[in-house]
Amino acid sequence: MDETVHHTGPIWVWRAQEKGSWHFITIDGEAGEALTGIALMRKLEFGRRAGFGSLKVLARIGESEWNTSVFPDKKRGWLLPVKAAIRRAENLVPGDEFALSVTPL
Protein backbone atom coordinates (compact mmCIF):
# COMPACT_ATOMS: atom_id res chain seq x y z
CA MET A 1 0.00 0.00 0.00
CA ASP A 2 1.43 3.40 -1.02
CA GLU A 3 1.33 5.74 1.97
CA THR A 4 2.82 8.74 0.15
CA VAL A 5 1.21 12.00 1.23
CA HIS A 6 1.20 15.06 -1.06
CA HIS A 7 0.86 18.65 0.13
CA THR A 8 1.49 22.24 -0.94
CA GLY A 9 2.33 24.99 1.51
CA PRO A 10 4.74 27.78 2.41
CA ILE A 11 8.09 27.45 4.09
CA TRP A 12 8.41 29.40 7.35
CA VAL A 13 11.11 30.14 9.91
CA TRP A 14 11.16 29.40 13.63
CA ARG A 15 13.79 31.40 15.46
CA ALA A 16 15.25 30.46 18.82
CA GLN A 17 16.68 33.24 20.93
CA GLU A 18 20.40 33.39 20.17
CA LYS A 19 20.45 29.75 19.04
CA GLY A 20 19.69 29.98 15.34
CA SER A 21 16.66 29.28 13.24
CA TRP A 22 14.93 26.34 11.61
CA HIS A 23 12.88 26.24 8.41
CA PHE A 24 9.68 24.19 8.27
CA ILE A 25 6.65 23.53 6.19
CA THR A 26 3.43 22.71 7.99
CA ILE A 27 1.56 19.68 6.69
CA ASP A 28 -2.07 20.15 7.69
CA GLY A 29 -5.56 19.52 6.35
CA GLU A 30 -6.18 16.17 4.66
CA ALA A 31 -2.45 15.49 4.30
CA GLY A 32 -1.94 16.10 8.03
CA GLU A 33 -4.87 13.83 8.88
CA ALA A 34 -3.35 11.11 6.70
CA LEU A 35 -0.03 11.38 8.57
CA THR A 36 -1.87 11.22 11.91
CA GLY A 37 -3.60 8.03 10.77
CA ILE A 38 -0.33 6.49 9.62
CA ALA A 39 1.37 7.38 12.91
CA LEU A 40 -1.51 5.84 14.88
CA MET A 41 -1.34 2.64 12.85
CA ARG A 42 2.42 2.44 13.40
CA LYS A 43 1.91 2.90 17.14
CA LEU A 44 -0.69 0.13 17.21
CA GLU A 45 1.51 -2.12 15.06
CA PHE A 46 4.74 -1.62 16.99
CA GLY A 47 3.33 -0.85 20.45
CA ARG A 48 5.29 2.37 20.87
CA ARG A 49 5.91 5.66 19.15
CA ALA A 50 9.07 7.48 18.12
CA GLY A 51 10.54 10.40 20.08
CA PHE A 52 8.25 13.44 20.25
CA GLY A 53 5.65 11.41 18.32
CA SER A 54 7.74 11.82 15.17
CA LEU A 55 7.33 9.79 12.02
CA LYS A 56 10.34 8.90 9.83
CA VAL A 57 9.77 9.82 6.19
CA LEU A 58 11.39 10.16 2.80
CA ALA A 59 10.63 13.77 1.82
CA ARG A 60 10.65 15.09 -1.76
CA ILE A 61 10.58 18.69 -2.98
CA GLY A 62 11.25 19.29 -6.67
CA GLU A 63 14.24 17.16 -7.67
CA SER A 64 15.51 16.84 -4.08
CA GLU A 65 14.76 14.03 -1.65
CA TRP A 66 16.08 13.23 1.80
CA ASN A 67 15.37 11.09 4.86
CA THR A 68 14.03 13.05 7.82
CA SER A 69 11.20 12.99 10.33
CA VAL A 70 7.97 14.96 10.60
CA PHE A 71 6.85 16.11 14.03
CA PRO A 72 3.30 16.61 15.30
CA ASP A 73 2.34 20.07 16.55
CA LYS A 74 -1.04 20.39 18.27
CA LYS A 75 -1.59 23.91 16.95
CA ARG A 76 -0.30 23.58 13.40
CA GLY A 77 -0.34 19.99 12.16
CA TRP A 78 2.81 18.10 11.20
CA LEU A 79 6.11 19.96 10.84
CA LEU A 80 8.60 19.02 8.13
CA PRO A 81 12.08 20.51 8.69
CA VAL A 82 13.70 21.69 5.46
CA LYS A 83 17.48 21.71 5.72
CA ALA A 84 19.70 24.36 4.12
CA ALA A 85 21.03 22.06 1.38
CA ILE A 86 17.47 21.41 0.15
CA ARG A 87 16.54 25.09 0.35
CA ARG A 88 19.61 25.98 -1.73
CA ALA A 89 19.08 23.19 -4.27
CA GLU A 90 15.42 24.12 -4.80
CA ASN A 91 15.91 27.89 -4.39
CA LEU A 92 13.38 28.12 -1.53
CA VAL A 93 12.94 31.18 0.65
CA PRO A 94 10.53 31.79 3.53
CA GLY A 95 7.03 32.47 2.25
CA ASP A 96 7.48 30.44 -0.95
CA GLU A 97 4.78 27.85 -1.54
CA PHE A 98 5.86 24.54 -2.97
CA ALA A 99 4.59 21.04 -3.57
CA LEU A 100 6.07 18.21 -1.56
CA SER A 101 5.53 14.57 -0.85
CA VAL A 102 6.42 12.49 2.18
CA THR A 103 6.53 8.71 2.28
CA PRO A 104 6.61 7.10 5.72
CA LEU A 105 9.56 4.75 6.19
Image (spheres, rainbow, N blue to C red):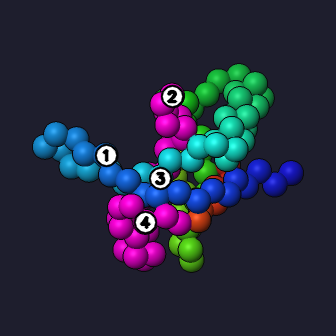
- When the figure is inspected, residue 63 is found, relative to residue 46, above or below; the finding is below
> Crowding at label 4, few (<14), some or many (≥20) Cα neighbours within 10 Å?
few
Look at label 3 and name its amino acid. Answer: Ile
Give the image location of residue 81, x and y in percent.
44, 51
- Which residue is rendered at x = 49% and y = 64% of the image? 97
- When the figure is inspected, residue 55 is found, relative to residue 80, above or below; the finding is above
Give the image location of residue 32, x and y in percent.
63, 42
Look at label 4 and name its amino acid. Answer: Asp
For the view shown, which residue lies furthest in the right direction?
1
Which residue has dot 3 on it? 25
Magenta residues (range): 72-98
Q: CA distance from mark 4 to mark 1?
A: 15 Å
Which is more N-terminal, label 3 or label 1?
1
Say if the magenta span includes residue 2: no
Which residue has dot 4 on it? 96
- When the figure is inspected, residue 44 is found, relative to residue 92, above or below; the finding is above
- Which residue is rendered at x = 73% and y = 55% of the image? 4
Of the pair 11 and 58, the residue shown nearer to us: 11
Image check: 59 left or right of 85? Answer: right
Give the image location of residue 75, x and y in percent.
48, 31
Q: CA distance from mark 1 to mark 3?
A: 10 Å
Mark seen at residue 14: 1
- Which residue is rendered at x = 57% and y = 47% of the image? 27
Which is more N-terminal, label 2 or label 3?
3
Look at label 2 and name its amino acid. Answer: Lys
Q: CA distance from mark 2 to mark 1?
A: 16 Å
Of the pair 41 and 78, the residue shown nearer to us: 78
Which residue has dot 2 on it? 74
